[in-house]
Image (cartoon, grey):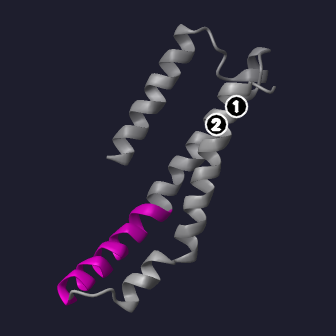
Amino acid sequence: MVIPGSIVVLVTGIGAALVGDVALFGPLQNAPAWPLVGLVVFIGINLLVPSVFLPRGKQFGEALDEATTRGAVTRRLRLAFAYPVAVLAHRVELAGVALIIALMVLKPF
């Protein structure tokens, strides 16, 4: 669901920029840079899906299935929740979304 949803957001966002006459490539088109920065951040966030979230999601799913079978929270499940790379990736994702929203609202540059 995440990957097709991201593609829809990207396509509709580019479409809205074209309809609204917003220069996506900012400085390359003698326009503000915030749309280009937002696009780069969006692409960066989406790169986390195949590189971190999908592989860790499979491992998390296995740990969750094991814990469900046992009827208790297992050590493996606790470790899957606290995996440092996934935790950091989620924080980066949230910060990126906040940055994109700030860029769209404030249009700082």
Amino acid marked by disc 2: Ile
Asked if residue 60 lies in the magenta stretch, the reply is yes
Q: What's drawn in magenta, residue-wise?
A: 52-70
Q: 44 or 73: nearer the eye?
A: 73
**CB-based contact (under 8 Å), mark 1 and mark 2:** yes
Residue located 52% across and 22% down the image: 14
Q: Is residue 56 visible?
A: yes
Q: Is residue 72 above or below residue 16?
A: below
Residue bearing mark 1: 103
Mark 2 lies on a secondary structure that is: helix
**Image spot of residue 101 (x, y percent):** 63, 34
- SS assignment for the magenta stretch, majority: helix
In-image side of 2 versus 17 (left or right): left
Crowd around label 1: few <14 · some 14–19 · many ≥20 (10 Å): some
Q: In this figure, which residue is indicated by the disc labeled 2?
A: 100
Identify the image quadrant of the C terminus. top right
Above-or-below relation of 52 to 96:
below
Task: Give the residue at x 64% y 14%.
Answer: 22
The image shows residue 26, relative to residue 86, as above or below, that is above
Task: Kindly give the residue lying farthest to the left in the view shown.
Answer: 69
Task: Give the image quarter of residue 97.
Answer: top right
In the image, 4: left or right of 45?
left
* SS for dot 1: helix
**Residue 38 at x, y percent in the picture:** 65, 34
| Viewer-side residue, 42 vs 65 | 65
Q: The residue under label 1 is which amino acid type?
A: Leu
Label disc, if present, on residue 14 of the rendered structure: none
Picture coordinates of residue 6, whole percent (x, y):
43, 39
Q: In this rendering, would 51 be left or right of 91?
A: left
- Residue 78 vertical placement versus 94 (above, below): below
Tell me the crowding category of disc 2: few under 14, some 14 to 19, or many 20 or more residues within 10 angstroms, Cα based.
many
